[in-house]
Image: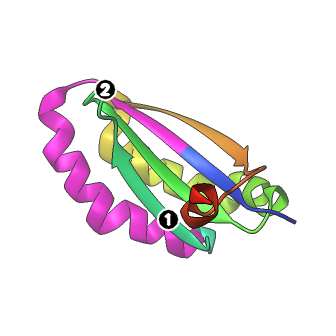
């Protein structure tokens, strides 16, 4: 059983929404999702190429756990809360990533 990531990609329709979205995600959504998903860890970032793109990652001990979270009642609740807060102003996609290789930086340096 390896590591799996649930990745959520969000695209903001309006640049003016970014500060409010960033605050909301930091103070409400990410902490709530981490708790509901019981993920091993979570982090988020903004694209350095397209400032309207936001990514959130949730780490799990295996693809099965990530898939079960994706189908869970907790996920449906968080999606409903997200939709109430942002409606059609933010478009999202989700993917589950199966980590097949991870090399510590020290090992890569030789």
Quadrant for residue 5, please give it.
Answer: bottom right
Q: Main secondary structure of the magenta part?
A: helix
Q: Earlier in the sequence, mark 1 or mark 2?
A: 1
Q: Which quarter of the rendering shows the N terminus?
A: bottom right
Task: State the residue at coordinates (66%, 58%).
Answer: 103
- Residue 74 shows in this picture: no
Image quadrant assignment for residue 15: top left
Q: Residues within 10 Å of mark 2 (few under 14, many from 20)?
A: few
Which residue lies under the disc numbered 2? 49
Q: Nearer the viewer, residue 50 or 85?
A: 50
Left or right of 7 on screen, residue 14: left
How many residues crowd around disc 1 within 10 Å: few (fewer than 14), some, or many (20 or more)?
A: many
Residue 15 lies in the magenta-colored region: yes
Q: Residue furthest right?
A: 1
The quadrant of the picture occupied by the C terminus is: bottom right
Q: Is residue 21 magenta?
A: yes
In this view, the residue in front, 71 or 34, is: 34
Q: Residue at x 69, y 65 (%)?
A: 60
Q: Percent x, y for residue 64?
A: 84, 59
Q: Which residue is mark 1?
A: 42
Q: Position of residue 54 (x, y in %)?
A: 36, 40
Secondary element type, mark 2: loop
Residue stretch in magenta: 8-36
Question: What is the tally of numbered marks visible in this picture?
Answer: 2
Disc 1 and disc 2: Cα gap in Å? Answer: 22 Å
**Residue 35 position within the rendered picture, expressed as x and y whole percent measured from the top left:** 53, 75
Residue at position x 27%, y 67% from top? 27
Q: Could you say where residue 77 lies in the image, as x and y percent from the top left?
A: 55, 58
Q: Secondary structure at mark 1?
A: strand
């Amino acid at each position: 059983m390896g590591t799996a990531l649930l990745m959520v990609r969000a695209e903001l329709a309006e640049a003016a929404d970014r500060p409010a979205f960033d605050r909301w995600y930091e103070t409400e959504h990410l902490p709530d999702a981490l708790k509901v998903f019981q993920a091993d860890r979570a982090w988020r970032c903004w694209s350095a190429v397209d400032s309207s793109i936001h990514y959130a990652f949730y780490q799990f001990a295996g693809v099965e756990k990530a898939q079960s979270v994706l189908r869970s009642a907790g996920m449906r609740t968080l999606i409903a809360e997200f939709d109430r807060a942002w409606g059609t102003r933010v478009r999202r996609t989700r993917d589950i990533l199966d980590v097949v290789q991870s090399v510590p930086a020290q090992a890569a340096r030789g």
